[in-house]
Structures are given as C-alpha cells and as structure tokens.
Image (cartoon, coloured by chain):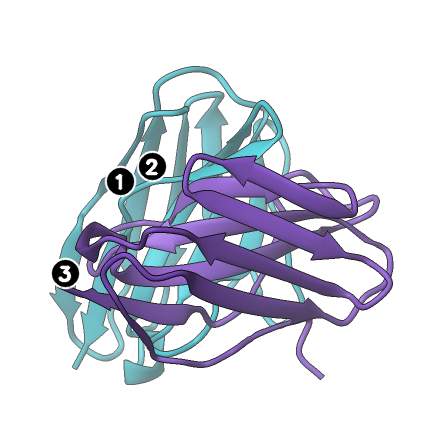
Chain colours: A purple, B cyan
Amino acid sequence: QKEVEQNSGPLSVPEGAIASLNCTYSDRVSQSFFWYRQYSGKSPELIMSIYSNGDKEDGRFTAQLNKASQYVSLLIRDSQPSDSATYLCAVRKRGSTLGRLYFGRGTQLTVWP
Amino acid sequence: SAVISQKPSRDICQRGTSLTIQCQVDSQVTMMFWYRQQPGQSLTLIATANQGSEATYESGFVIDKFPISRPNLTFSTLTVSNMSPEDSSIYLCSVERTGELFFGEGSRLTVL
C-alpha cells in the first residue's frame, strides 16, 4: 500500500466550478498535511498546509482533514484556467525530519474557459 | 519563502556517465533535501544533506549511486553516478523554512 494516494484524474472542470481533489494516507501517525501545486515544467509550490481535523480556508482554497478516516482534500472554489496544474498531496509523519515528506502521484486539473 | 537555485536546469547525458547537480540557497539552513521526480511517479526523498556530516539516505538510495556534498550552510551537490535511462528524472533540491518545504526549480536529466 502506498503511503499517500490521490485520485488519479485527470480532473476537468469548467471555469467557475468547484474542483475537488482527494488524498488518503496509510500511516495513522501522520501529523502534517500539505497541498502543493505544480505547473508543467515547474517546481512544486506550497498552497495549503493543515495540521488538525476540520477545514482550513485560504481565499478560494479550502483544505479538509479527517484523521479518523485518514483523508485530506482540497477544494478550489470559482476555479480559474490559471488553476490548471498538477496538485500534489504530501504528508509528514510524526517524529520525521521536517523535510521528509511523502507525496502522492498528483492529480492533474484542467479548468476550461 | 526561500530562493533556491539549481544548476543545470536540464541536461542530456550518455549512459554510464555521471552528472553533478548544484544547489544554492539564499540563506543558511541546517538541512537540505534532495528529491527525485520520475515521470508519472511521486516525488521521493533521496537523502538529507547536513553540513559537516555524511548525508542520510532513504531506503532504496545509496551513497555510491548518489553521492552528496554539503561544504557549507548554503550549498549542496548531488551526483548521479553511472547513469542509466532509469535515472531520467527531475531532481529537486529543497529546504525547510518556517515549517514548510520549499523547492528549487529542479534539474531535468535525460539519459540516453
């Protein structure tokens, strides 16, 4: 079983819609969760981090964490063509070195005008 | 955030050769991290580079294949040795700052 799994996509939504990206993780002691965005040919950039159960909102982005279900998601409201990218879910286990993250394979999102 | 510069940004290499990737950070950091992103695969940590000590390698990665140097607190190199086509990948240098991990632009290697 992979440490982090994401819905493989690709995901295609119209402009203005809500894009929903999902991620599950295998290790219950995971404690920090991150969403990165990676444009084609570019390096990943952090867009959200979440550490406790519930929702965390930042502008059009909302991260949701459910540790009991070992599930983390990212919602993008009012999706824009500029949101078209690959979204990577990453997990840090309790006690791990800060830079030691486990990544999913990513979900490719396309927002069409 | 962090400013992380990597060189080369891309290269095409012949099988059996070695290539060294350089990573420069805009300020001092204790640890630097090297990741690999193979086509269609997830980002995977290769090793953690500490200044003044040997790098710590993750399972599946060995020093003979991926020697790392860390001569000071702002610089590190990763060498990909005796390359094969399976080493074709993006190699990313990263640093932690304020609890978040930041990545360089990556070095895209193609091995023929």
Query: What residue does disc 3 label?
Result: B11
- The residue that appears at 65% across and 60% down in the rendered structure is A72
Tag 1 subunit: B
Q: Is residue A92 placed above or below B41 in the rendered structure?
A: above
* Percent coordinates x, y for residue A95 in the rendering: 83, 44
Residues indicated by labels 2 and 3 sit on the same polypeptide chain: yes
A89 sits to left or right of B74: right
Q: Answer with mark 1 or mark 3, whichever residue precedes in sequence.
A: 1
On-image quarter of the N terminus of chain A: bottom right
Q: Answer with mark 1 or mark 2, whichever residue precedes in sequence.
A: 1
Q: Answer with mark 2 or mark 3, whichever residue precedes in sequence.
A: 3
* Percent coordinates x, y for residue A109 in the rendering: 32, 68
Of B61 and B91, nearer the camera is: B91
* Percent coordinates x, y for residue B36 in the rendering: 43, 62
Of A60 and A49, nearer the camera is: A60
B109 sits to left or right of B50: left
Whether residue B65 is visible: no
- The residue that appears at 77% across and 42% down in the rendered structure is A52
* Residue B6 image label: 1
- The residue that appears at 81% across and 68% down in the rendered structure is A69
A68 sits to left or right of A39: right
Q: Is residue B111 placed above or below A100 in the rendered structure?
A: below
Q: Residues within 10 Å of mark 1 (few under 14, many from 20)?
A: many
* Percent coordinates x, y for residue A37 in the rendering: 37, 52
Whether residue B53 is visible: yes
Measured Cα–Cα span from mark 1 to mark 3:
12 Å
Query: What residue does disc 2 label?
Result: B23
